Amino acid sequence: MQNSTLIIVILACWRITSLFVHEAGPWDIFSRLREWAGLEYDAAGQVIDSRHKLLEVLACVWCLSLWIGAALLALYLIGGDNLLVAVSLPFALSMGSIIMERLMG
């Protein structure tokens, strides 16, 4: 794997993890997923309860990033660099835009 591919995958892993853990997403899909998992939050945004302890991984960036990274690794093992970059690039570009917005804003 080339360095440029690795950077793309790292940015994509962070972006995908952030979508699942922190963001509502289009049509509130990620919020609904967290609600479906039974995650309940306090006013500060901390998980106070869940129906399924295993699904609390959806509330932890450190935990979920391991699983997202494993999924991206599986894509690499199945399809090589081309498939991995094709799937990761939109998320990496989004992450790049977010970084630029935060730096400039």
Image (tube, rainbow, N blue to C red):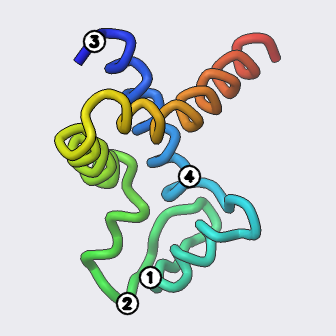
Mark 1 or mark 4, which is nearer the start of the sequence? Answer: 4
| Residue 19, numbered label | 4
Q: Which mark is residue 48?
A: none
CA distance separating discs 4 and 1: 15 Å
Give the mark, 4 or 2, whose residue is nearer the N terminus: 4
State the SS at label 2: loop
Query: In the image, residue 74 lies at what x, y percent?
Result: 21, 48
Measuring 25% from the left and 33% from the top, which residue is drawn there?
80
- The residue pinned by badge 2 equals 51
Q: Measure the alpha-carbon separation of dots 2 and 3.
A: 42 Å
The three-letter amino acid code for the residue at tag 4 is: Leu
- Circles 2 and 3: CB distance less than 8 Å? no
Amino acid at the residue labelled 2: Arg
| Mark 4 vs 2: CB contact within 8 A | no
Mark 2 or 3, nearer chain start: 3
Badge 4 density bin: few <14, some 14–19, many ≥20, Cα 10 Å: some
- Label 3: how many Cα within 10 Å (few below 14, some 14–19, many 20+): few
Percent across and percent down for residue 5 are: 36, 19
Specify few, some or many for label 1: CA neighbours under 10 Å numbering under 14, 14-19, or 20 or more.
some
Q: Decide: marks 1, 3 in contact (CB < 8 A)?
A: no
Residue 8: x %, y % from top left: 43, 23
Kindly identify which residue carries mark 1. 37
Of the two numbered discs 1 and 2 on the same chain, state the one appearing first in sequence: 1
Are circles 1 and 2 on residues that touch, CB within 8 Å?
yes
Q: Give the number of the mark in front: 2 or 3.
A: 3
Tell me which amino acid carries mark 3. Answer: Gln
Mark 1: amino acid:
Ala
- Most distant residue in the right direction: 105
